[in-house]
Image (cartoon, rainbow, N blue to C red):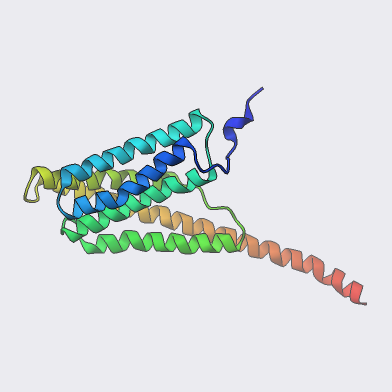
């Protein structure tokens, strides 16, 4: 008999995986300050620590059966905050164009709106698709390469161009994933409206008969 406990999601807050997630979140402002001030090597170390804790919290959550609702929220939130911090820090130092910042943040704003629509329809949040995962991976490869290029090369070089190229691919995939979320949300909204109309059409005659 398969143990179903592994699939359970708890409401616990103070778990070891969640504590690691809190550590990741606490290091976001440290990462941003180091990046803005040009301490690229130290910023890379913080990013590496974040990546290690990201792996550990997921591994331990499954291993110790400590998957929690809070943990499912903290993990993507930490990823987005690190992406935001990297965007702002790199743009501030003119290592990436500001339009890239606007493009990526614009996609996140759209997702917030889609989340509000789904909440109004009482539909659970959409799962992360593979395009979104690849987009995040590209951004987390491209941004560190840009920081490494700044540390090794005081002027933009080949490594900088590679990092920027991967970041641009990540941004394109980011929007591709966002469009897929938009299409899915539109389908859910139309299905909900169709179900409501069908339900209303069944209730209408019955209510008329009751009134008569």
Q: Looking at the picture, does residue 191 appear above or below residue 161?
A: below
In percent of width and height, residue 166 lies at: 24, 47
Residue 13 in the figure: left or right of residue 197: left
Q: How many marks?
A: 0
Q: Residue furthest top?
A: 1
User: Where 55 sits versus 25, above or below?
Assistant: above
Q: Residue at x 42, y 48 (%)?
A: 76
The residue at the far right in this view is 212
Relative to 195, does residue 125 appear above or below in the rendering?
Answer: above
User: Would residue 135 be seen by someone viewing this image from the given angle?
Assistant: no
Residue 126 in picture, x, y percent from top left: 52, 51
Q: Is residue 22 visible?
A: yes
Query: Residue 212: horizontal and vertical position, in percent?
Result: 93, 77
Which residue is situated farthest in the bottom direction here? Answer: 212
Q: Is residue 193 above or below residue 164?
A: below
Q: Residue 200 is drawn in which quadrant?
A: bottom right
* Picture quarter with the N terminus: top right
Depth check: give the residue in front, 174 or 10.
10
Instruction: Using the rendered view, name the quadrant where residue 194 is placed.
Output: bottom right
| Quadrant housing residue 118 | bottom right
At a point 39% along the width and 59% down the height, the residue shown is: 108
Could you tell me which residue is drawn at 48 percent across and 34 percent down?
61
């Amino acid at each position: 008999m398969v143990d179903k406990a592994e699939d359970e999601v708890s409401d616990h807050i103070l778990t070891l995986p969640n504590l690691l997630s809190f550590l990741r979140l606490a290091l976001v402002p440290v990462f941003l300050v180091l990046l803005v001030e040009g301490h690229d090597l130290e910023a890379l170390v913080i990013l590496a620590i974040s990546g290690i804790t990201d792996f550990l919290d997921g591994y331990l959550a499954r291993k110790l059966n400590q998957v929690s609702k809070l943990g499912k929220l903290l993990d993507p939130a930490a990823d987005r905050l690190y992406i935001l911090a990297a965007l702002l820090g790199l743009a501030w130092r003119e290592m990436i164009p500001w339009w890239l910042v606007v493009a990526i943040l614009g996609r996140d704003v759209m997702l917030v709106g889609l989340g509000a629509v789904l909440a109004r329809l009482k539909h659970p949040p959409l799962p992360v698709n593979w395009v979104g995962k690849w987009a995040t991976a590209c951004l987390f490869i491209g941004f560190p390469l840009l920081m490494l290029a700044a540390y090794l090369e005081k002027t933009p070089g080949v490594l900088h161009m590679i990092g920027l190229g991967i970041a641009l691919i990540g941004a394109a995939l980011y929007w591709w994933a966002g469009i897929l979320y938009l299409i899915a949300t539109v389908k859910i909204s139309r299905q909900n409206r169709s179900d409501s109309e069908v339900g209303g059409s069944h209730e209408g005659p019955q209510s008329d008969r009751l009134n008569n």
